Each structure stands twice: as structure tokens, then as C-alpha cells.
């Protein structure tokens, strides 16, 4: 495997994805058009501006050429010129949440004082960014039409240049103003951080003074959601809805108290009321959170939007501290686009730079000419781990020297970068870790367990006989495939053998990862979840779990066949997520609306017990297979059917058929055990 080639390929893919975003945006504005017409006629007119000079210089040129075309919203100003961007030469640092506390509680005049305290490249770069933003503001206020429609909003934006926010509305508008430029410069998967904590002082003070009613606050949050949801096509690099716009709610503090407020409840209420797949909501949970908050979260999930995602502080925070995050920072964690923990403003953590596929070294083992020499499962596992070590070296070795494009737009709102006077991608961050996602652990575990059962324990087949059946893609061997697939002792089941083997492979991977360090002195981390459970399996041969060539892997921490939820949770609780194994460990399951409604109180109790016992993260789809099948057959009759995909929610009709089929099959399996 040539990792450098893969990185170059990823850079090319990023540019192609940018083209796709343009295509989607143009299609939305001007009606459907063929892709050939788009690439032949439209794309050449799309402007990549400011290709020369530093990133700050490119940004200044870009801002000067932007057209102002705000989204249609009566409460907020938000404008992205979807047909202009700066040159993307290497991989952009994204999948991140900037520290919006700086946007809300600081101001550019104060930041300029810090930037200009020394005459260096960092100060000049940051000054250029702020000056360009001010010129954009001046362009807005010089447009009479814009001023007549967005005068109040522009006044709120003007405050960012001279003082901290003074109201709930002003804080929301300032967040949107800065957020639009992240998208404008090609950054993708832009998280929004702990908004209930950041915004609550302004909400509370406005309510106290009588300047804001709870009803008006709800309207503003609704408009805020709607603005961010606008142009989801443009913001989605791969699948529609995968924007990374995640809002973090709730969470424990260092004293062990659970911190939530009226906005925590309000954001969940509005998410349920609007019934939009985007932006996404993540609720940080613990066993001492208010029961009515968890109940409200389940009410929201019951609508089918797949939100909020549940992240357990009692597992995530200790894992982060064991990995090396300071205690205060760990308690203040947010996540990347989906679920991977990081610290807003202090991290340069790219948490899904690459996907480790546990099945690839297993396929190498099966393909070896002397595969039939093994006389025990222990020998096979030992060889597999040797091949896994070599596979990890081929991935992480080249990544040790990997650097992202500089990002002065992110750097000037990072307190750590301002202190160090370095770009966030060049050592300015406090944490400089790289995270990998993983797929195929379930297929690996099940394959090894089936070999142990059928070859060494029951002696039904020799290794060669079983391997030939696998190589034939189970052609004319459907009965054997069925036996392999339906083994009750499988990944996700509460079996000592399964748990021990899973932890053995995870612990081995952890030790291998600890041997490598990033270019800026950080560490590598991984987790047991990935968006690539379909794409990462497409070119993978059949495996001894009964999976045919190209068929998907199991999703996150789940079972290919249906398992009772209590058993799956029991399995997940017994996995070791400490140290570098913290990069997202999501239990993923499907329940029918009827089942959740009839058992809501039991779900609440089950979740509280799971939090206290160390479950890491959870997400669920609330839908039944009949609805999914009908929606696939007649999408026009189900225009608002929303499903949870890998770490985001999307309209079912917008998903490729492979993802629809995967959800349908998983729903059918889950209904067998519910």
C-alpha cells in the first residue's frame, strides 16, 4: 500500500468533491442539468481566486471578489458565494469545531492588539484576515438593498470588530458570520461547539432584562437551525447531509456535576419540532444527568431524525485524560464531524484522516500459499497480528510526516495559536493528534471464531476446503454461508471468547499505534467506528463470517445478524476504550417506533445503567423495515423520512441505494429480536 499515493489521491478527491458541491449548488439554483453539461460549460466559469501568495493573501483576494447573496431568512444574515473558493493545494484541516467562545466573548480589535504586538509573519497574516473580514462588512453596508433588509443583522456583525457580544441575538449572528467563511474557504465538516454553555449567559441576561422572551428565543434558535440547514447539498462532501454541523449540548464538569440549562432543552425541542436532518445535535450524557433531559432526548430520537447522538462523559473523559488531554480540556470536549472527541480551539486533531481495515491483513493471511499449515486458532491469530502490525506500519509510517495546509482563519480564533504565534497546523495547537477510524473488526472476529469452530473444534472442514468455499464467493454453498452468518457466538454477543479476542486485537492495535508520532509531536489514535463500512468493503473478498465479496461490514459496534440490545450493550461495555482507543466507539442499533414508544421508561433505565457501566457512545434509528421498503419503492410518498447514516442524519430518498439496502436489511434483522 502506497500511503503517499493515497494522500495525493485524497487531495485530488477533495478537489473533485468541491466540484461536486458546485454541481449540486448550480443544479439547485438553475434546475437539474447533466453532469457533462456542468463540467463542459459551468465548471470552467467557476472561480478559484487568490491562487498565489500566502493563505491570508488568498483569503483577502477571495473576499474582495465575493458576491453577497444572503439566504432567505428574516432573522439572520448568512451569505456564501458558492461559486468562488481559494486554491486547494493540499489537504485542508477540517472536521473540526473552532472555539466559538472567542467569537462570542472576544472581539477582533482585542485580537488585533495581540497580533500586532510583534512584527512577525503570524501577526501580519492574522491582521490581513481581520482586515479582509472588515472590508467584507463594509461591502455589505455599502449595498443599500442589503442594509434595508439586514440592517439589524449588520449592526450585530459590526460588534465583532470592537467589543464582545451584548445579546443572545448578537451572539448567534456573530457565530453565523464567522461560520460562513469557513465554508467559503473550502473547510468542510464545521462543528459548532457547546452552544448551550456559550450562549446561556446572554440568554439568561436578556430574559432577566426583559429584552427577550422564551418564545422569541425559540424563534431565533429555529431560524439559526434553518440558516445552517440551507444549502445542505453544498456543504455535503460525499453524501447529502454529511455536513459535520454538530451542536454539543450538556456535559459534566470537573466537580462531577452535570451542567445543562434552559438552552439545552430548547435546542433539543427545536430539533424535534423542525424535524430537519441538519444541523445535528449531540448530547453529552452521564448517570447523574436529569432524567427528564434524557427522556426529552428520547422523544426527539423517536421522531426518526437520529438525534441527539448520545456521548457518555463517564467513558469519554477518562479515556481522553488517559491519552494525555489535560483534565480541564477533557471536561470541555466537543467532537469532530460525527463523534470523535477533541478540544475546540486547542486541538489540531484530524480525527478521520484514514481508515484502518482490520480485514485486509486477514485476507492476506487467507491468500498465503501455506495457509493450510496451521494446526490451531492460536497460530492463526498470532500470524494475523504479525500481518496487522505490518499493515499499520504501512499506514502510520508515511502519516508521521503529514502536514495540512495552513489555516490562518482558524488560527486567529485559537487562544493557544495567539499565545504561541503559530498557525494551528504548524505547531500552534496544544494537541496535535491524528485519528483513524476502523472497519471490519466484526468480520475479522467472526471469521476467526468460525475457523475455530468448523475446522479445529468440530473438524467439519480442513482449512483448504473452507478457504476454497470462501474463494468461490460461496457459489453453490449457500447452506455453509448461512451457517457462517448465523453463528450465535458472534461479534457483539456477550460471549467471553468474543470479548477476549476483540480486546486482544484492540490492545495489540493500541500498542502498535503508540510507536508512531505526528509531524507536530502528537500521537495517533483510533476507534471502533467508521463511515466506511460500505465503501471500505467494496473491494474486499468474501470472509469466513459468510459475508460475500463486496458486501458491507457491520456498522460501528453492532452485529451483522440481529442481537438483543441488552446483549449488544453488555458486549460494548466490556471493550477497553482508554488511551489511544478513544477515537469514537459507537453502539449503533435500530428499533421500531412502536417498540421505543411502548418501552420508553425501560430505555431510560437501560441507558442510565449503560452510562454508569462505561458505554462509550450510542446512536439509534427509530424506523421499521416496512416503512423503509415502501420509501425505497415510492420515494415521493416519503419525502421527509429521515434516517441516521454513519454519524449524520439524512433524508432517506437522498441516499444511494447501497445505503438504503443496508438500512433495510439491518432493520429486518433487528426486528427479529425486538
Image (spheres, rainbow, N blue to C red):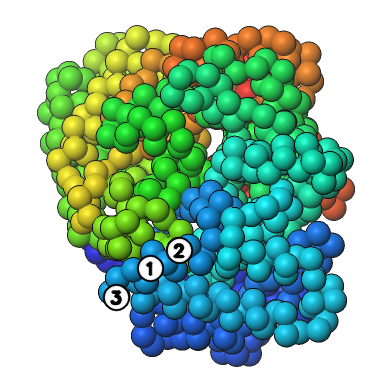
- Does the rendering let one see residue 532? no
Q: Are marks 1 and 3 in contact (CB under 8 Å)?
A: no
Residue 610 location in percent, x, y?
52, 14
Examine the image and state in which quarter residue 117 appears: bottom left
Judging by the rendered image, the residue that carries numbered circle 1 is 115
Q: Secondary structure at mark 3?
A: loop
Q: Within 10 Å of the Cα at label 2, are there few (<14), some (14-19), or many (20+) other Cα atoms?
A: many
Judging by the rendered image, the residue that carries numbered circle 2 is 111
Q: Secondary structure at mark 2?
A: helix
Residue 257 location in percent, x, y?
53, 19
Residue 74 location in percent, x, y?
84, 62
Examine the image and state in which quarter residue 303 appears: top right
Q: Are marks 3 and 2 in contact (CB under 8 Å)?
A: no
Q: Are marks 1 and 2 in contact (CB under 8 Å)?
A: yes
Residue at image point 17% right, 20% down: 378
Judging by the rendered image, the residue that carries numbered circle 3 is 119
Give above or below for 658 relative to 81: above
Q: CA distance from mark 1 to mark 3?
A: 8 Å
Q: Quadrant of the N terminus?
A: bottom left
Q: Quadrant of the C terminus?
A: top right
Residue at image point 65% right, 81% down: 138
Q: Within 10 Å of the Cα at label 1, are there few (<14), some (14-19), or many (20+) other Cα atoms?
A: many
Q: What is the number of the mark on residue 258?
A: none
Residue 93 location in percent, x, y?
40, 60
**Is 159 situated left or right of 109 in this image?**
right
Give above or below for 602 relative to 13: above
Q: Nearer the viewer, residue 479 or 226?
A: 226
Q: CA distance from mark 3 to mark 2?
A: 14 Å
Residue at image point 32% right, 35% down: 325
Q: Nearer the viewer, residue 663 or 619?
A: 619
Amino acid at each position: 500500500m502506497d500511503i503517499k499515493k493515497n494522500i495525493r489521491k485524497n487531495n485530488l478527491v477533495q478537489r473533485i468533491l468541491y466540484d461536486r458541491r458546485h454541481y449540486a449548488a448550480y443544479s439547485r439554483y438553475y434546475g437539474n442539468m447533466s453532469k457533462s453539461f456542468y463540467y463542459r460549460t459551468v465548471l470552467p466559469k467557476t472561480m478559484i481566486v487568490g491562487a498565489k501568495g500566502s493563505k491570508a493573501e488568498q483569503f483577502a483576494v477571495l473576499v474582495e471578489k465575493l458576491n453577497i447573496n444572503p439566504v432567505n431568512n428574516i432573522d439572520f444574515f448568512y451569505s456564501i458565494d458558492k461559486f468562488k473558493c481559494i486554491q486547494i493545494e493540499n489537504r485542508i484541516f477540517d472536521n473540526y469545531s473552532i472555539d466559538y467562545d472567542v467569537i462570542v466573548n472576544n472581539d477582533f480589535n482585542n485580537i488585533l492588539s495581540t497580533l500586532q504586538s510583534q512584527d512577525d509573519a503570524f501577526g501580519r497574516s492574522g491582521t490581513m484576515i481581520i482586515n479582509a473580514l472588515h472590508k467584507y462588512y463594509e461591502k455589505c453596508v455599502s449595498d443599500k438593498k442589503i442594509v434595508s433588509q439586514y440592517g439589524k443583522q449588520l449592526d450585530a456583525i459590526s460588534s465583532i470588530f470592537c467589543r464582545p457580544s451584548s445579546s443572545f441575538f448578537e451572539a448567534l449572528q456573530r457565530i453565523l458570520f464567522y461560520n460562513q467563511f469557513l465554508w467559503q474557504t473550502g473547510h468542510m465538516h464545521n462543528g459548532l461547539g457547546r452552544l448551550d454553555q456559550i450562549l446561556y449567559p446572554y440568554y439568561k441576561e436578556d430574559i432577566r432584562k426583559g429584552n427577550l422572551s422564551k418564545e422569541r428565543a425559540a424563534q431565533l434558535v429555529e431560524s439559526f437551525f434553518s440558516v445552517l440547514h440551507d444549502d445542505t447539498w453544498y456543504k455535503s462532501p460525499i453524501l447529502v447531509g454529511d455536513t459535520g454541523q454538530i451542536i454539543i449540548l450538556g456535559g459534566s464538569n470537573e466537580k462531577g456535576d452535570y451542567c445543562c440549562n434552559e438552552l439545552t432543552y430548547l435546542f433539543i425541542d427545536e430539533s424535534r419540532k423542525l424535524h430537519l436532518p441538519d444541523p445535528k445535535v449531540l448530547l453529552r450524557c452521564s448517570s447523574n444527568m436529569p432524567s427528564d433531559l434524557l427522556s426529552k432526548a428520547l422523544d426527539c430520537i423517536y421522531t426518526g431524525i437520529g438525534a441527539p447522538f448520545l456521548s457518555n462523559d463517564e467513558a469519554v473523559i477518562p479515556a481522553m485524560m488517559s491519552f494525555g488531554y489535560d483534565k480541564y480540556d477533557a471536561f470541555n470536549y466537543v467532537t469532530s464531524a460525527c463523534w470523535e472527541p477533541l478540544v475546540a480551539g486547542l486541538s489540531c486533531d484530524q480525527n478521520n484522516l484514514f481508515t484502518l481495515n482490520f480485514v485486509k491483513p486477514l485476507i492476506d493471511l487467507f491468500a498465503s500459499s501455506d495457509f493450510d499449515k496451521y494446526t490451531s486458532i492460536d497460530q492463526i491469530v498470532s500470524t494475523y497480528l504479525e500481518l496487522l502490525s505490518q499493515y499499520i506500519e504501512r499506514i502510520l509510517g508515511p502519516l508521521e510526516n503529514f502536514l495540512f495546509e495552513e489555516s490562518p482563519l482558524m488560527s486567529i480564533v485559537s487562544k493557544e495559536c495567539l499565545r504561541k504565534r503559530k498557525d494551528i497546523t504548524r505547531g500552534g495547537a496544544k494537541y496535535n493528534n491524528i485519528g483513524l477510524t476502523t472497519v471490519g473488526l466484526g468480520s475479522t472476529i467472526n471469521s476467526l471464531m468460525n475457523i475455530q469452530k468448523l475446522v479445529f473444534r468440530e473438524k467439519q472442514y480442513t482449512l483448504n476446503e473452507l478457504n476454497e468455499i470462501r474463494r468461490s464467493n460461496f457459489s453453490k454453498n449457500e447452506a455453509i454461508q448461512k451457517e457462517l452468518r448465523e453463528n450465535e457466538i458472534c461479534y457483539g454477543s456477550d460471549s467471553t471468547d468474543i470479548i477476549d479476542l476483540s480486546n486482544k486485537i484492540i490492545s495489540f492495535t493500541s500498542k502498535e499505534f503508540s510507536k508512531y508520532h505526528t509531524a507536530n509531536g502528537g500521537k495517533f489514535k483510533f476507534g471502533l467506528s467508521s463511515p466506511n463500512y460500505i465503501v471500505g468493503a467494496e473491494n474486499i473478498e468474501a470472509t469466513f463470517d459468510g459475508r460475500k465479496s463486496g458486501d458491507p461490514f457491520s456498522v460501528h459496534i453492532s452485529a451483522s445478524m440481529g442481537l438483543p440490545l441488552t446483549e449488544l450493550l453488555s458486549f460494548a461495555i466490556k471493550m477497553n476504550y482508554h488511551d489511544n482507543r478513544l477515537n469514537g466507539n459507537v453502539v449503533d442499533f435500530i428499533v421500531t417506533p412502536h417498540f421505543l414508544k411502548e418501552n420508553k421508561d425501560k430505555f431510560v433505565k437501560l441507558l442510565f445503567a449503560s452510562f454508569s457501566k462505561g458505554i462509550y457512545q450510542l446512536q439509534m434509528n427509530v424506523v421499521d423495515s416496512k416503512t423503509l421498503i415502501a420509501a425505497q419503492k415510492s420515494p415521493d410518498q416519503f419525502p421527509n423520512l429521515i434516517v441516521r447514516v454513519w454519524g449524520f442524519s439524512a433524508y432517506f430518498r437522498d441516499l444511494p441505494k447501497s445505503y438504503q439496502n443496508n438500512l433495510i436489511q439491518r432493520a429486518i434483522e433487528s426486528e427479529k429480536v425486538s
